[in-house]
Amino acid sequence: MNATIKLESTHYPVLLNELISIISPLYGGTFIDCTFGQGGYSSKILENKLNNIIALDRDRKVNNFANILSKKYKNRFNFFNKKFSEIDKLKIKKENIKGIIFDLGYSMNQVKDLSTGISFKSTSQLDMKMGLNDLSADYVINQMRQENIYKIFKYFGEEKRSKVISKNIINQRKIKNLNTNDLVQLIEKSLKGYSKTHKATKIFQALRIFVNKEISELIYGLINSFKILPIGGVLVVVTFHSIEDSIVKFFFKNYSTGEVGSRYFPRLNNKKKLFNLVKKKPTSASISEIKNNPSSRSAKLRYAFKMSENNDFIEFINKFKFLLEIENLERK
């Protein structure tokens, strides 16, 4: 998961101007970049000498980008090769944090790295690991039961023909283990008719989510970010598909109202308001940004300011418990 898109040697941090206007880095402070990638957000924020960055990324391949910023901004930039769900384990001074940033998109560098198996053009073994995990897409496709493969495709990829595709995978792997190219061809044969996007898009999305435990990473990343964010600090999240966005939307909306009840019963102010949700609808990329960076067309930015402490977030976890259970199917 990265914050930076690289196209033709140019870096395109998604919705950069919009994000900068929200976090107000001109006033100085410490910001946590939970998805460092190639450092697009971090670099921009560090241009102000009053700012400090704490950056995280699970992908070890971004260490070279982190080293560049470490040398350029000595004592103002710190990088940790960690999953952002572990953000609360960092030893940092909570009171100095002004904002926490998530960008849940994959960088073009990751897509172009054919060894990861993320690209449809890859002919290598299925992998899709983003770092700090052991399970690969190869295990899912070549070893898991059809019933569980079907569930992963249906609920993480929202693919209508998941049952057909999962059945064809089971039949084909009896002949040989499938690699990335084999899987792409199998999906294309399984899905007939015209498609605006590549026919393998939803299945590959499902595999990435499952392999990297992106549901639990996001849920606990949000919860643990709330724990270390001081009151008045801002939490910003950029999502790229409907599952991510539904999780973030519920997190902000559910905990930003002080009213509970229904149209038939009186509203009760017994629910603690944790966030100030300035804008209910997400911010999307402008036409000009999409033209320069087509990857930004599906980006949605949501943000909220922390207003109070303490919540067990049980309601939030239970809301997406079904997805969390699917994420742990047949794990070694």
Image (tube, grey):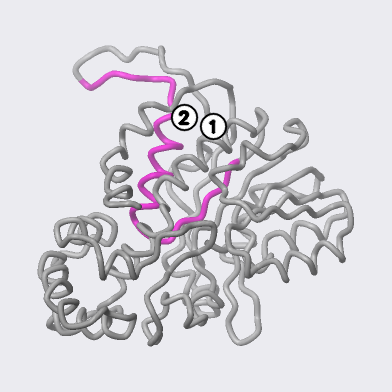
Determine whether the residue tagged by mark 1 lies in a helix, strand or loop. Answer: strand
Vertically, is 178 above or below 107? below
Nearer to the camera, 36 or 116: 116
User: Could you say which disc has been placed on residue 276 in the image?
Assistant: 1
- Name which residue type carries label 1: Asn
Percent across and percent down for residue 283 are 49, 55
Instruction: Please report whichever mark, 2 or 1, sits nearer to the chain's N-terminal start.
Output: 2
Q: Residues within 10 Å of mark 2 (few under 14, many from 20)?
A: many
Image-based side of 12 in relation to 252, left or right: right
Name the residue at 50% across, 48% down.
Answer: 302
Vertically, is 149 above or below 219? below
Image-based side of 313 in relation to 187, left or right: right
Distance between mark 2 and mark 1 Cα atoms: 6 Å
Nearer to the camera, 211 or 231: 211
- Name which residue type carries label 2: Ser
User: Could you say which disc has been placed on residue 79 in the image?
Assistant: none
Bounds of the magenta segment: 235-263
Nearer to the camera, 143 or 183: 143
Q: Quadrant of residue 188?
A: bottom left
Q: Quadrant of residue 150?
A: bottom left
Are discs 2 and 1 less than 8 Å apart at CB?
Answer: yes
User: Could you say which disc has been placed on residue 256 in the image?
Assistant: 2
